Image (cartoon, grey):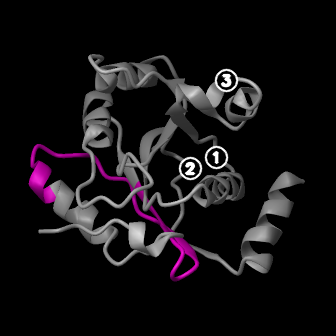
Amino acid sequence: MIRAIYKFIYFKLMGWKIKGAFTQEVKKCIVAVVPHTSWHDFYIGLMIRSISKLQINYVGKKELFKPPFGWYFRWTGGAPIDRTPGQNKVQAMAAVFEGKEEFRLTLAPEGTRKRVDELRTGFYYIAKEANVPIILVAFDFGKKEVKIDEPFYPTDNMKADFDYIHKFFERVVGKVPEKSFRFNQ
């Protein structure tokens, strides 16, 4: 029922489309979503997840998981992350994949809703450490579409991998256009 409502809202009321699709066979992966410019990205992500019929999880700062709304974020697939300095978050996140049969982790490589010129690399290193593919997803408010790429495994050539990643997100416009990711070469 909720899926039908999300499809109606997403396709009919909002007039958005989906370009590409998640590969159902990929049970473990990093879903890297760019740009992250607004809280609107959250409900777009929830709708895409429901429409795609996939369990996709996310992490958020631990403060979001306190009462009164913590139950909601957990219910929607969220898990709190402690962002205290001095921890090896890459290894901790990669270890989560080991104990799960199915785990798709959504991360925003920008690390903030502010404008950035460089993506953070944690998502890339988590994928390498956990030996899982990365699926790039663009929330393009300019074209009113969510673009989903094919899964790819990070190689030992980080520069070539990031060239590919930057090209995928080229000219994608976020909800707040001036905060959209723009790679400066």
Q: Can you tell which of label 3 and label 1 is closer to the viewer?
A: 3
Q: Which residue is disc 1 drawn over?
A: 54
Total marks shown come to 3
Q: Which residue is disc 3 drawn over?
A: 66
Residue at image x 65%, y 56%?
52
Residue type highlighted by circle 3: Lys
Q: Can you tell which of label 1 and label 2 is closer to the viewer?
A: 1
Residue type highlighted by circle 1: Leu
C-alpha gap between disc 2 and disc 3: 33 Å
Quadrant of the image containing the C terminus: bottom left
Q: Is residue 121 above or below residue 117?
A: above
Query: Does any portion of residue 44 appear in the rendered image?
Result: yes
C-alpha gap between disc 3 and disc 1: 26 Å
Residue type highlighted by circle 2: Gln
Earlier along the polypeptide chain: callout 3 or callout 1? 1
**Magenta-colored span:** 136-160
Report the disc number at residue 24.
Answer: 2
Q: Nearer the viewer, residue 106 or 24?
A: 106
Q: Is residue 58 above or below residue 169?
A: above
- Relative to 76, 171 lies left or right: left
Q: Is residue 137 magenta?
A: yes
Residue at image x 50%, y 70%?
176
Dots 1 and 2: beta carbons under 8 Å?
yes
